[in-house]
Image: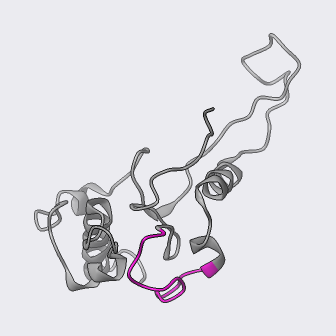
Amino acid sequence: GYRRRYYDTFSTILLPNSWLHVDREKVRGSLKGEDVAMAKMNQDKTLQWILKEGRRQPISPSLSNNNNNNEEEVQYQPVPVRSCFNGLTLYRADVWLEPKCRYDSYHKDDDAYLSKRYQHACEHIVFHECLRRVLLEKGGVSG
């Protein structure tokens, strides 16, 4: 049977720096700012965490556009993350258009996110960490 779960842990880093990937070179908790409990979440727990973090207060049936039943309508809002894949992503245009940031670029700091199996960091992390470095250089975000 089908189980709903969050599957793409290779690209996912929760704020401030909790990488969810299991097959990793670095020991959990060794990344600066990493929450070990969050980094140890499996795919099922990650999905539940995302749904909980993104859930808005229920809208009463009288305020909802869907007046066909008396159930509260559940709505979700974006969940900020350091890196991910398979979702809506918002980038600052002045940073996203930076020509040195590409999915195939490399920086020595990306080694913190090496997979044992693949011996490289996920291309989404590489791109997002480059954007983060550009923002730091511009003074637009803290470490």
**Residue most extreme to the left:** 99
- Magenta stretch bounds: 22-36
Q: Residue furthest right?
A: 70
Identify the residue at horizontal 51%, vertical 67% (top origin): 20
- How far across and how far down the image is residue 101, in percent? 17, 65
Q: Is residue 120 magenta?
A: no
For the C terminus, give its image quadrant: bottom left
State how the image is colored: one colour
Q: Is residue 135 left or right of residue 9?
A: left
Residue 26 lies, in percent from the top left, at 42, 84
Residue 37 location, quadrant:
bottom right
Q: Is residue 45 left or right of residue 15?
A: right
Q: Residue furthest top?
A: 68
> Measuring 46% from the left and 60% from the top, which residue is drawn there?
9
Total marks placed: 0
Up/down of 138 relative to 76, above or below: below
Question: Is 119 above or below relative to 93?
Answer: below
In depth, the one of 81 and 91 nearer the eye is 81
In the rendered image, which quarter contains the N terminus? top right
Question: Percent x, y for residue 19?
Answer: 48, 71
Instruction: Compare residues 6 and 131 and report the one nearer the observer.
Output: 6
Residue at 24 percent across and 63 percent down: it is 95
Q: Position of residue 57 (x, y in %)?
A: 78, 44
Task: Please indicate whether residue 46 sits to the left or right of residue 121 in the image.
Answer: right
For residue 35: magenta? Answer: yes
